[in-house]
Image (cartoon, grey):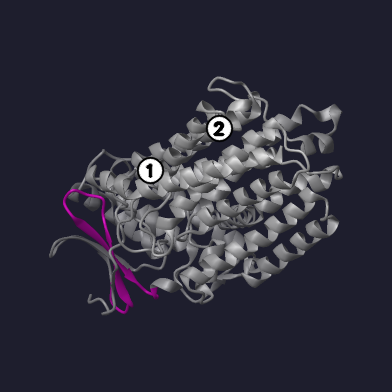
Amino acid sequence: MKASLDVVWVGAVGAFAITALAMPLVLRGWQALGRRDQEVSLRKVHTGEIPRAGGLVMLLGFGVMLLVGLAGNQPLSLTHHLFSVTPLTGSLVGALLVGLTGLYDDLVGMRARHKLLMQVAAASIAVLYGLHWPALELLVGWDYWWLTPGLTVVFLVAAVNAVNLMDGLDGLAGGIVFIGLATILVSIVSAPVVGPVNQAVAWTTACALGAVGGFLVHNRHPAKVFMGDAGSYFLGFLLAALLLHTRPVRWRVPELQFAIPWLVLTVPFFDMGMAVLRRKLRGQPIFASDSDHVHHRLLAAGLSHRAAVMVLWACTAMFAVMAYLNVIGVGGWWTLLGTLLGLIVAAVALGYHRLLARLPAFSGERRVGWRDRRREVMEILDALERLSQDGPEDRGPARWRRLAPEVGGLLRRLGVPGFEVRRGEVTVVEQGSSRGTWAWLGLPLPDEEKAELRLALAVRLPDLQQEQLMLLERVVGLMAGQAAASRQWVAVRGALHEDAPSS
C-alpha cells in the first residue's frame, strides 16, 4: 500500500503551483476592488498596505486539488465522494466554514462573539460527522464518554484561535502550519500498513501542505500578502482536525497518544495561554489585541524579524519531532517532561514570570499592583463603552466636540495630558495641555474628512505599556464612531514627530 502514497505528492505539487501562480492575479483583483489593509493599530510591525488575500488563494489551490482527488482514481476517491459522511468530510466542511467566516471578517468585519459562534458550529459539524479523539476517549473512560465530543470541539476552536494569534510576523503562522502538516504526512508514510482512509488523509494533508508552501513564497519577509483570518482560521482548523486522524504505529499509553496533537501545536498554544493569562490579569477583554505575544517579545529582545521567525519555526520543529517520535513508538514520557521544562524556561526567558510584578502607573512615578491596574483598566473600558453608546449617532466635528471633555479626562488617566483633532492645518478640537510632553502621536481617524487625532505623549512610544496601547486604540475608535471604525481601519502613518509639541 505504501507505493500508492507516491501519488499524493501530485496533490502537493499541484496545490503549490496553483497557489503560487494565482497569488499575483488575485492580489491585482483584490486591489482593484479597493480592498486595503487600513488598520488603526499601534501593534503593527509592517508598513504599507498589504492585502489579506492569502487565505482566499490557499482555499483556491487546496480546493482545486481536492476536487482532482475526488474526480480521478486517486487515494481520496477510494473512500470519499462529495456527499460522504465521514470524519474527514466533516473536517473539510468545518475547515471551509471557518475559512469563509474569516474571509467575511477580512472583507466586511465581524464581531468576536459571532466569529466564535461560527467556529463552534464548524467544530460541532466535524464531530457530528464522526470526528473523534480516541486517546481522549481512553483517558476519560466509558463512564464519561459524553464529555469527549464537547472537549473535541473546544480543542478545534482553541487551535483555530491559537494559529490566528500567531499570525503576527511574515511567514510565522504559515511556517508553523507547514511544519505541522509535514509531521502528519511523514507519520502516515512511516506506518507499516497504509489503509485507504490513511491514503485519503495523506492526499488531503499533501494538498494543504502544497497550498501553504505556495503562500509562503509570497509571504516571506518582507511579505507581499497576508493570509488574513480566512487563512489562519482555515489552516488552524484543518491542522487540528488532521492531527486527530494521526495514530501511533503501535500501541502507546493513552497519555502519550493524547499528547501528539498538543506537541505539534505547542508553540501556538503556549502563546495563546500566555495571552489569555495576561489579559485576565490586566483587565483587558480576552479578544482584545495587544503587542505582547511571543514574537513581539523576541523582537523587543533585539532579534530581527527573520531571526524571530526562525527561532519560533525551530521550536515548532523540535516539538514536532517529539510528536513524531511518539507516533513511531520511540518517544516516551521524556518527551512530555522535556516539553514542560522547555515551556517553563521559555516563559522565564521571555519575562512572563513578571506578570504579577508591580507596574509603573499610567501617570506619575508610583507603582501599582496588578489588581489595581486591572481595576483601572476595567473602569476606563467601561467609560469608553458608555460613551460609545450614549448620545446621538453624530459624526465629525459635532461628535469630537461632544466627547472631548470626557475623553480628555480618560486620556489624562492614561498619562496623555492633552490631545487635539486636526483637519488639515485647522485645529477643530483641543483639550488639555501639551506643555512639557515628549512628542505628538498622530493617528488618522476613519473619517471621510481626513481628520487626525493627535496625542501629546509624556513618554516615548516604545515605553507605552500594553494596556495603554489597547486603550488608546479604543479612544480612536470612539472618536471615529463605532460604525465608522468597524472595518474602515486606518494605518498609523508614522506620525510620530520627533519635535517636542508646542502648547
Q: Position of residue 262 (x, y in %)?
A: 70, 49
Of badges 1 and 2, nearer the viewer stands 2
Left or right, 116 with respect to 5, comes to left
Q: How many marks?
A: 2
- Residue 9 image offset from top left, x and y in percent: 56, 45
* Residue 113 versus residue 53 in the image, above or below: above
284 left or right of 386?
Answer: right
Q: Residues within 10 Å of mark 1 (few under 14, many from 20)?
A: many
Q: Which residue is mark 1?
A: 106
Q: Is residue 424 magenta?
A: no
Q: Nearer the viewer, residue 354 or 167?
A: 167
Amino acid type at circle 1 is Asp
Q: Secondary structure at mark 1?
A: helix
Q: Is residue 466 above or below residue 160?
A: below
Q: Earlier in the sequence, mark 1 or mark 2?
A: 2
Which residue occupies 32% across, 60% down? 408
Task: Give above or below for 81 relative to 448.
Answer: above
Q: Which residues are magenta?
A: 434-460
Q: Quick check: is 457 in the magenta stretch?
A: yes
Q: Quadrant of the C terminus?
A: bottom left
Give me the residue at 25% from left, 76% from top.
501
Q: Secondary structure at mark 2?
A: helix
Real-space Cα distance between discs 1 and 2?
21 Å
Give percent across and percent down for residue 315: 64, 63
Location of the N terminus by quadrant is top right
Q: Residue at x 85, y 45 (%)?
A: 252
Toward the left, the furthest residue is 425
Give the side of residue 496 with respect to residue 2, left or right.
Answer: left
Residue 215 in picture, x, y percent from top left: 44, 51
The amino acid at mark 2 is Leu
Circle 2 packing at 10 Å, graded few (<14), some (14-19), many (20+), is many
Residue bearing mark 2 = 92
